Image (tube, rainbow, N blue to C red):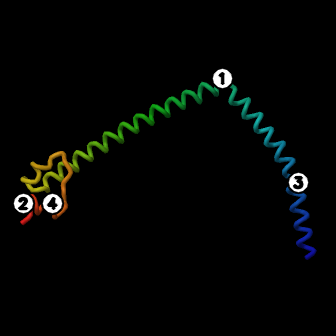
Amino acid sequence: MRYKAVFVMGLAAGYVLGARAGRQRYEQIKRMGKSISSNPTVRHTTDTAQAQAMHLGERARRAAQEKAGAMGHDLMEKMQRKIPAGLSNRTSNQEINLDAESLHSNGMMT
């Protein structure tokens, strides 16, 4: 029990001393960060980097859209090759109805 009390007291003392030193260090880092961010060279560099990142992001978005469009087109062509010719002509650019009742009532399923 004695060791626990000594440990808790040491922990409390370390916390108090660390909190004081930590607050001072935090304030020091905060001041240094403000002085760096107010530097015109740093501001120019961050603005340039941000503009380049936005430009690259836009290029990546366009490339992804083009790739997705090409993949969709390829998939559509593959699907059309697998669909029977009579059904393909009736459903081009429409949803394919796979409901058995409607196919049977339309005379497509006998």
Q: Position of residue 96 (x, y in %)?
A: 18, 54
Residue named by callout 2: 107
The quadrant in which residue 73 appears is top left
The quadrant in which residue 29 appears is top right
Q: Which quarter of the rendered picture does the C terminus lie within?
A: bottom left
- Which residue corresponds to the image point at 19% horizontal and 48% vertical from the top-left? 94
Closest to the observer: 99 or 87? 99
Residue named by callout 1: 40
Q: In the image, 31: left or right of 59?
A: right
Q: Position of residue 25 (x, y in %)?
A: 81, 43
Q: Position of residue 103 (x, y in %)?
A: 13, 60
- Which residue corresponds to the image point at 90% horizontal and 73% vertical from the top-left? 3
Question: The disc labelled 2 sits on which kind of residue?
Answer: Gly
Question: The disc labelled 1 sits on which kind of residue?
Answer: Pro
Give the secondary structure at mark 1. Answer: helix
Mark nearer the N terminus (1 vs 2): 1
Q: Which mark is residue 102?
A: 4
Q: Which mark is residue 16?
A: 3
Circles 3 and 1, Cβ within 8 Å, touching? The answer is no
Q: Disc 3 to disc 4, how far (Cα)?
A: 77 Å
The quadrant in which residue 39 appears is top right
Q: Disc 2 to disc 4, how far (Cα)?
A: 9 Å
Mark nearer the N terminus (3 vs 4): 3
Give the secondary structure at mark 3. Answer: helix
Give the secondary structure at mark 4. Answer: helix
Mark nearer the N terminus (3 vs 2): 3
Task: State which mark lies toward you, 3 or 1.
Answer: 3
Question: The disc labelled 3 sits on which kind of residue?
Answer: Val
Mark nearer the N terminus (4 vs 1): 1
Question: The disc labelled 4 sits on which kind of residue?
Answer: Ser
Q: Disc 1 to disc 2, how far (Cα)?
A: 76 Å
Closest to the observer: 75 or 94? 94
